[in-house]
Amino acid sequence: GNSVTQMEGPVTLSEEAFLTINCTYTATGYPSLFWYVQYPGEGLQLLLKATKADDKGSNKGFEATYRKETTSFHLEKGSVQVSDSAVYFCALRAKAAGNKLTFGGGTRVLVKP
Amino acid sequence: KAGVTQTPRYLIKTRGQQVTLSCSPISGHRSVSWYQQTPGQGLQFLFEYFSETQRNKGNFPGRFSGRQFSNSRSEMNVSTLELGDSALYLCASSPLRDLETDTQYFGPGTRLTVL
C-alpha cells in the first residue's frame, strides 16, 4: 500500500539555522506530494506541493523537490525563524486512491531565539 | 473567501453516547474529506464525499458514518463512543476539478474528548 515515512522529531534549532526534514514515500504510479504545517491548536495548512517528478514546490522560504529516483520529497528552509515552530507533515495522494491523502507521522520543529 | 469551518470546536462526551460533527467547505468546493488525528495513530483518512455520495472510505468501523448535503456541507457521526475515539477530527475541502493538481484545504478541527 501507499505510505509516507518522515524523520521523527523533535528537531530543535536556533534562529537562522538551516532546516531539513526528510520524507520518503512508497506508492504505485506517480503520486502528488505535499507538505502541510500545523501550528498549536490549529488545523493543517498547505505549505507547498509538487505533482510530478523534478517539480519543486516553494512557499514562505520553504522548498521541496519531487525526486522520483529516490522516492523523496525533503523539506528545506535556509534560515528558520521562531515563528516556524510547528509540526510538519509530508503527505501523498496516489491517483488510484482518489482524493485520499496518506500522511507521514509528522515532525515537530522547535526554533529557539 | 472564507475557509473551511467546523463546529463545534470542542466536545466532551461519555462512553456509549453518539456525536455529530459538522463541516462547511470553502464556497465552490464539492469534495469534503474527514480525517482523524491522534497521538498514537497520527492522521488517518475516514471518508470522502462528493456530490452527496461517499467516494472513498478508510479502515474505520461502521460506528463512523457521514453524509453530505446538496450545499456540500458535511456531517460525520460516531455512535457508541469509545475512549479511543478521543481525537482531533479534521475536515478538508477541495474543488476536485483536476485530481492531479487538486489541493485539500483543512478546517481547524473538532477536538472530541470521550470520558
Image (cartoon, rainbow, N blue to C red):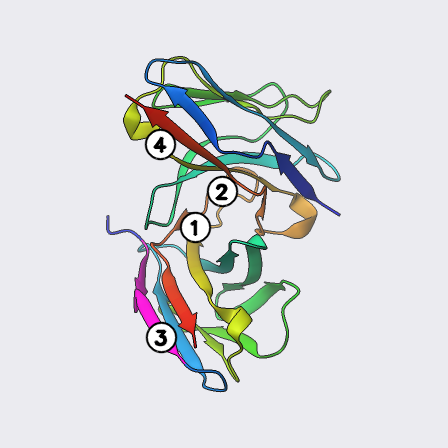
Point out residue A92 in the picture as x, y percentages from the top left corner: 60, 40
Point out residue B78 in the picture as x, y percentages from the top left corner: 50, 77
User: For mark 1, what is the residue?
Assistant: B95
* First along the sequence among labels 2 and 3: 3
- Quarter of the figure with the C terminus of chain B: bottom left
In this view, A106 is above or below B85? above
Q: Chain of mark 3?
A: B
Instruction: Give the mark toward the camera: 3 or 1.
Output: 3
Res. B21 visible in picture: yes
Q: Which amino acid type corresponds to the residue marked 3 in the rendered image?
A: Ile
Q: Which amino acid type corresponds to the residue marked 2 in the rendered image?
A: Asp
Res. B72 visible in picture: no
Q: Residue at x 66, y 51 (%)?
A: A97
- Residue A7 lies in the magenta stretch: no
Query: What residue range appears in magenta?
Result: B4-13
User: For mark 3, what is the residue?
Assistant: B12
Q: Residue at x 51, y 37 (%)?
A: B101
Instruction: Give the mark toward the camera: 2 or 3.
Output: 3
Q: How would you rate the neighbour count of disc 1 (Cα within 10 Å): few for under 14, some for 14-19, many for 20 or more?
A: some
Q: Are marks 4 and 2 on the same chain?
A: no
* First along the sequence among labels 3 and 1: 3
Q: Are marks 4 and 2 in contact (CB under 8 Å)?
A: no
Please tell me whether mark 1 sits on a helix, a strand or a loop: loop
Q: Which amino acid type corresponds to the residue marked 4 in the rendered image?
A: Ser
User: For mark 4, what is the residue?
Assistant: A85
Point out residue A45 in the picture as x, y percentages from the top left corner: 38, 41
Instruction: Give the mark toward the camera: 4 or 2.
Output: 4
Q: Residue at x 65, y 36 (%)?
A: A5
Please tell me whether mark 3 sits on a helix, a strand or a loop: strand
User: For mark 2, what is the residue?
Assistant: B102
Of residues B72 and B92, the one nearer the viewer is B92
* First along the sequence among labels 1 and 2: 1
